[in-house]
Image (tube, helix red, strand yellow):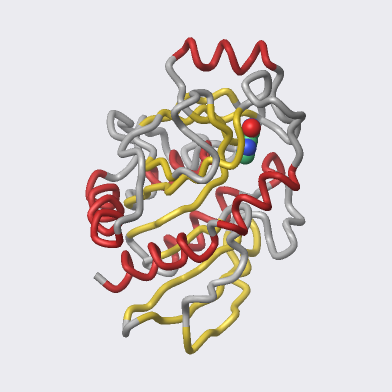
Amino acid sequence: MAIIGGTGVYDPELLSDIEQILLNTKYGCVAVTIGSYEGKKVAFISRHGKGHTTPPHKINYRANIEAIYKLQAKKIYATAAVGSLRKELKPGDLVILDQFIDFTKKRKYTFFDGEEGVAHVDLTDPYCLELRDKIISQCNKLKIPYHATGTYICTEGPRFETPAEIALFANWGADVVGMTNVPEVILAREKELCYATIATVTNYGAGISETLLTHKEVSEVMSNNNKLLRDLLKAIIGN
Ligand code: HPA
């Protein structure tokens, strides 16, 4: 399986027998850490790179998913920091995403540009049901509270949203907002890989939050939740 670590999840601290490789794909080169946990092989990719050096709109999503595909991993667990559009989704809460809305503008969001043929993938269930069940059952086992569903709206970033946008997104039925799940989730489906995201609420969206938004706030909540996420990922891999 593979893990794509989002903001605050930069190191595969849970893995042993670690090997760092640079994997060449036709879309670009990807730094992958390969290791194992309880005898299971795991590939880890840091979405933003170590030290958060790649902004959301510059991530090479196609290369990352192609690298995982080439490594023959079949399941991808991703983590993501998100802003909340609803009072009941509080900073620190986990949301197991089940739907998304695409509000990005200029990303390479398909492998099927014509050269590799034309395909229209079904996204009735964009997030893999089997992996979502697995996350939920391990949360139950570890007594980690979670929200079992959530609609993610993906913005282009790297700026945060305006309060008007946040109000619109909430009206559209979105629950959380982030900058990276699209096109990651789509590309995984195009490669027929099972993909699920454990989202961590780091802040209320602009206009709901009583303070101005900062990346520092996002990073701090992620770092407070780091052990919890690591324990959850360990339980998921090990079971
Ligand atoms: N907006 C967009 N992306 C985010 C946010 C937010 O409020 N918080 C964490 N990632």
How many numbered callouts?
0
**Quarter of the image holding residue 24?**
bottom right
Instruction: Choose between 32 and 147: the one closer to the eye.
Output: 147
Residue 172 locus on image (x, y percent): 46, 12
Q: Which percent across, then down, holds residue 80?
A: 53, 47
What is the x, y in percent for residue 17? 48, 89
Could one spot residue 68 in this view of the protein? Answer: yes
Query: In the displayed structure, does residue 10 sit left or right of residue 101?
Result: right
Which residue: 50% across, 35% down? 90
Q: Left or right? Give the position of 133 relative to 91.
A: left
With 220 as the anchor, is 14 left or right in this view? left
Q: Position of residue 179 (x, y in %)?
A: 61, 36
Which quadrant of the render holds ligand 1? top right
Q: Nearer the viewer, residue 14 or 118?
A: 14
Q: Residue at x 24, y 44 (%)?
A: 129
Relative vertical location of residue 180 with respect to residue 84 in this rendering, above or below:
below
